[in-house]
Image (cartoon, grey):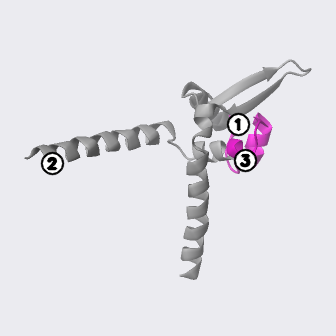
Amino acid sequence: MGCIENGLRQNHEKEMRAVQDSMYVLNGKWKIAIISSLCYYRTRRFSDILNDVKGISNKVLSKDLKDLELNKLVKRTILETHPVTIEYELTEHGRSLQIIIEHLTKWGISHRAQIIQG
């Protein structure tokens, strides 16, 4: 195998690892929908996200928000109100996903139209 082929293979392997890393962080049925909700609105309370993401349970939303927070995509802020209010927002790193969400939205609209057309 020549140097160019070896370089292409290493680049491909690096790109595949990056895709797998991305899929690992965004895995599951709901995380992209949660991020989408937070892209559309600057801050959201738990109940707001629950209403936005149809079909998600309290337990799963709580777990996924914690996962997204651990991966530095979501910031959780406790407001000193009575009763206490908790707000969620995307971090700067999380906002970098906005362009991907926009592309997924456009693709989803196009795909739905393709399927309906038959």
Circle 3 residue = 40
Q: Is residue 21 left or right of residue 62?
A: left
Q: Position of residue 91 (x, y in %)?
A: 64, 31
At numbered mark 1, what does the secondary structure look like: helix, strand or loop?
Answer: helix
Figure check: 82 above or below 114: above
Question: Residue 16 placed where, x, y %?
Answer: 33, 44
Judging by the rendered image, the residue that carries numbered circle 1 is 58
Ranked by sequence position, the earlier of labels 3 and 2 is 2
Q: Which label lies toward us, 3 or 1?
A: 3
Task: Specify the farthest residue to the top.
Answer: 80
**Element on which disc 2 rests:** helix
**Residue at position x 55%, y 50% in the image:** 100
Q: What residue appears at the point 59 percent right and 42 percent down from the top-left corner?
A: 31
Contact flag, marks 3 and 2 (Cβ < 8 Å): no
Q: Residue at x 61, y 54 (%)?
A: 102
User: Start and end of the magenta stretch?
Assistant: 37-58
* Furthest-left residue in this view: 1
Q: Which amino acid type corresponds to the residue marked 1 in the rendered image?
A: Asn
Label placed on residue 5 = 2
Let me know if residue 42 is in the magenta part. Answer: yes
Which amino acid, by three-letter code, is at mark 2?
Answer: Glu
Measure how far apart labels 3 and 1 are at the Cα level.
21 Å
Give the mark, 3 or 1, whose residue is nearer the N terminus: 3
Residue flagged by tag 3: what amino acid is it?
Tyr
